[in-house]
Image (cartoon, rainbow, N blue to C red):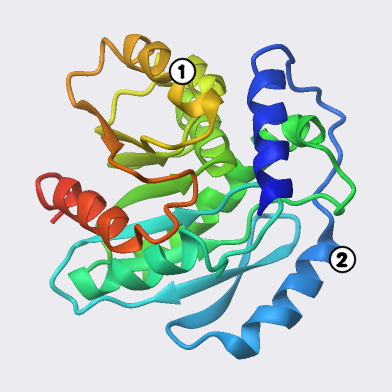
Amino acid sequence: MIKHALQLRTFLFIVLCIGFVQDAPASDLNKEKRWREQIIDAILDGEPVDLNNGRHDFLAIYTEGDGSRETGLIIMHGIGIHPDYPSVVNPLRVGLTEKGWSTLSLQLPVLPNEATGEDYGPLIPQAASRIQAGIEHLKQAGLKRVVIVAHSLGTIMAGHALANNTVEISGFVAIGMGAGGARYLKSIQVPILDLYGSNDQPGVIGSAQLRQSAAASNRDYTQIAAKDADHFFNDQEDELIRLIANWLDTRAK
């Protein structure tokens, strides 16, 4: 957990300074395979599905709601982890189904364990094709609209795809987005919930005003600082779900 936090702080600074090169490194598919082997038999809620981004298969976990909602949720994890990670990701992908929404948690591009936060910069654009595959899966399952619920580095990957009109969705929940996300918020006009903890990482708390200013042209942008929550909403999972569910209730039926 500490390692992830340190990598995150480094990444959020670097992403402000670097561009994305065309000859980018690919996701570590062997690591993705290991993640799959470790988690697939332990999934208690939902079903693993294999999606394809046009180049290779990747893991996702589909958890069906009660059928009362027409909107599906794509869940996007943070740096270097997997779609059933116990912090933030699993609570969201399961807890939001209990509120009626179907969720699809995606395995995002990852790098070997020794990779640093800045190494992830070139992988950011590669998430778009996975998001698109997720959207198509949800539409095939009968959902009419899609909202992205992303955490940490996942917010940057989602933001890049949305700002570049790579994918079309109906809303965006960004949890723990740092300063690097501001560049994307300027160009995103779907409803946005910018959610972070009052005890979040310094780069997240310190850039709250920057993100708010960047989204000034978006009439449906909401920023919330969750009291006493840290970056991973440890011991605040119920509050995390409540805040997101309340926001979704007014925008995603």
Which quadrant of the rendered structure holds the N terminus? bottom right
In the rendered image, the residue lying farthest to the left is: 250
**Can the viewer see residue 187?**
no
Question: What numbered label is drawn on residue 207?
Answer: 1
Q: Residue at x 73, y 71 (%)?
A: 35
- How crowded pointer 2 is (Cα within 10 Å; few <14, some 14-19, many 20+) is rated as few
Q: Which residue type carries mark 1?
A: Ser
Choose top left, top right, bottom left or bottom right for residue 41. Answer: bottom right
Question: What numbered label is drawn on residue 54?
Answer: none
- What kind of element bears circle 1? loop
Residue 64 image offset from top left, x and y in percent: 33, 78
Residue 55 image offset from top left, x and y in percent: 75, 55
Q: Residue at x 18, y 76 (%)?
A: 67
Residue 40 image offset from top left, x and y in percent: 63, 83
36 lies above or below 198: below
142 lies above or below 174: below
Q: Residue at x 55, y 43 (%)?
A: 154
**Can the viewer see residue 112?**
yes
* In the displayed structure image, the side of residue 82 where residue 232 appears, left or right: left
Q: Residue at x 36, y 13 (%)?
A: 209
Choose top left, top right, bottom left or bottom right for residue 107. Answer: bottom right
Q: Which residue is mark 2?
A: 30
- Which circle's residue, 1 or 2, is located before the other in the chain? 2
Q: Which residue type carries mark 2?
A: Asn
